[in-house]
Image: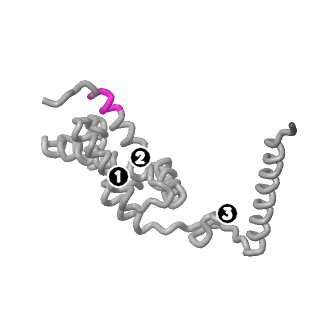
Amino acid sequence: MEDDTHMGYNHVIAVSNYYRVQQERFQSLQDYRDQFITYRKVCEQLGIKIGESEEGAANMLKKEKIVNPTQQQKDDAAKNAVEEHHAILFMLGTDKYKYGKLLEDMNNDVILKKDPFPKTVAKACHVLSKWRNSYGKSNNGKGDSNDGIAFATVTNEKEANKNETRTKRRNESRVSGCWESIKEP
């Protein structure tokens, strides 16, 4: 029998990690998806049912205009509601720099009572993999060719002068330290 001493703690950490997972700046979509799915599986293995609610299933049935659902339709609606929950969470965790415009547009569509989010993580991955950022008029100079990273180059002459200055300072400190350590009789 497994030790359940830390079950509560494990549940909190698993759920916390799952809801906090974010795609890192240069992390591939595939790596982010794998990480997201792993956190989801950990929760499922602990028996945590993320995204399940009666309201979610009822809303799915309402969207599909099913008034008197069969048990199978209820079960399918519940499953679809959970999948949609995971897909939205996945989308919201993506790299804001790369997909921020897409997410902003989707959020605006929600305000307009549209249903823009993909219904599964697989469909979300497909949408994200095909997305191309368009930087419109508010281009802040950062595009695919200019991501805001700058590099400085140092010529050999500048580097030589810097090294010469360092060596001179180091030698001066050694000499002064040497004189300080010699005491007169």
Q: CA distance from mark 2 to mark 1?
A: 8 Å
Whether the magenta-drawn stretch holds residue 9 is answered as yes
> Badge 2: few (under 14), some or many (20 or more) residues near its Cα, within 10 Å?
some
Nearest to the observer: residue 99 or residue 36 = 36
Q: Callout 2: helix, strand or loop? A: loop
| Residue at x 41%, y 46% (from the top left corner) | 21
Mark 2–mark 3 contact, CB under 8 Å?
Answer: no
Q: With respect to residue 75, does 164 lie above or below?
A: below
| Residue placed under numbered mark 2 in the picture | 21
Q: Callout 1: helix, strand or loop? A: helix
Does 88 sit left or right of 103 as displayed?
left
Nearer the viewer's eye, disc 2 or disc 3?
2
Mark 2–mark 1 contact, CB under 8 Å?
Answer: yes
Q: Is the N terminus in the top left, top right, bottom left or bottom right quadrant?
A: top left
Q: Bounds of the magenta span?
A: 7-12
Whether the magenta-drawn stretch holds residue 135 is answered as no
| Residue at x 70%, y 68% (from the top left corner) | 152
Query: Residue 35, labelled with which disc?
Result: 1
- Looking at the image, tell me whether mark 2 or mark 1 is earlier in sequence order: 2
Instruction: Give the amino acid at mark 2.
Output: Val
| Residue placed under numbered mark 3 in the picture | 140
Instruction: Give the amino acid at mark 3.
Output: Asn
